[in-house]
Image (spheres, rainbow, N blue to C red):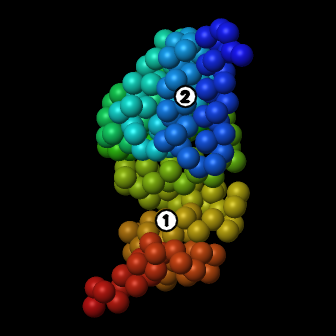
Amino acid sequence: MLNSNAEKAKAWLNKGAAFDHLGRYEEAVECYDKATKEDPKYSDAWGIRCETLLMLGRYEEAVECYVKAIEILPNKEKAWLNKGAAFDHLGRYEEAVECYVKAIEINPNYIKAWKSKGLSHIYLEQYFQALISYDRALRIDPNDIDASIDKAAVLENLGRYEEALISYDRALRIDPNNARAWNNKGVCLRTLRKDYEAMKCFEKAIEIKPNYASAWFNKNAPLRDK
């Protein structure tokens, strides 16, 4: 028999985790709700409830959940990161940036926060701030391929195409079979009117990922323009 609220909360958490494992996420959230009602300071229950809401696309509820989770554990960088992600999904990019800044204050080497901050700045068309974020991410991990690709995209938006190509090449040295890097490099080359080289990039992207719609679209662009 479960006598204390803490024991009941743990039982609800475990039941929710079982539903989670079965992919029955709405039922899992109901269990996590009951766990937090039994023990309002149960940080594990709040954390997993927030993550499940985020996964379900219930972003407003996820934000509210992270507010509560952060009240309990204000220095948990992952909670700030995920709260920022929920704001991003809601198009509330300034608030997302604030969350990523908080996560970085807690852990200055939190590369996920630097990359997410960079992406929010892109959405806000704040390209210089985005570039700073990606540069910081690459200082933490020079082999982070997504940071290299996204940095290249920022450089393109700043009209710094030759530097963007250097960043794409850096990504491709890390992973020569990255279809996204080949496709994006092709777009950059086409902007520079290097059509033959661009076409080779699109073909390489398609060779790696035959169903890559964006690469096919870019490859066939000259035919549509005729």
Residue located at (35% from left, 44% from top) = 123
Specify whether 129 is left or right of 69.
left
Q: Which residue position is annotated with label 1? A: 184
Crowdedness of circle 2 by 10 Å Cα count: few (<14), some, many (20+)? many
Residue located at (56% from left, 47% from top) = 24
Q: Residue furthest left?
A: 226
Q: Residue furthest top?
A: 4
Kind of residue indicated by mark 2: Tyr
Disc 2, SS: helix
In this rendering, the label closer to the viewer, 1 or 2 = 2
Q: Quadrant of the N terminus?
A: top right
Can residue 112 be seen from the camera position used here? yes
Q: Earlier in the sequence, mark 1 or mark 2?
A: 2
Task: Name the residue nearer the viewer: 146 or 201.
Answer: 146
Count up the numbered dots. 2
Kind of residue indicated by mark 1: Asn
Residue 60 is situated, as x and y percent measured from the top left of the image, at: 35, 33
Can residue 108 be seen from the camera position used here? no
The relative height of residue 108 versus residue 178 in the rendered view (above or below) is: above
Mark 1 and mark 2 residues within 8 Å of each other at the beta carbon: no
Residue located at (52% from left, 12% from top) = 40
Disc 1, SS: helix
Q: Which residue position is annotated with label 2? A: 32
The relative height of residue 19 versus residue 105 in the rendered view (above or below) is: below
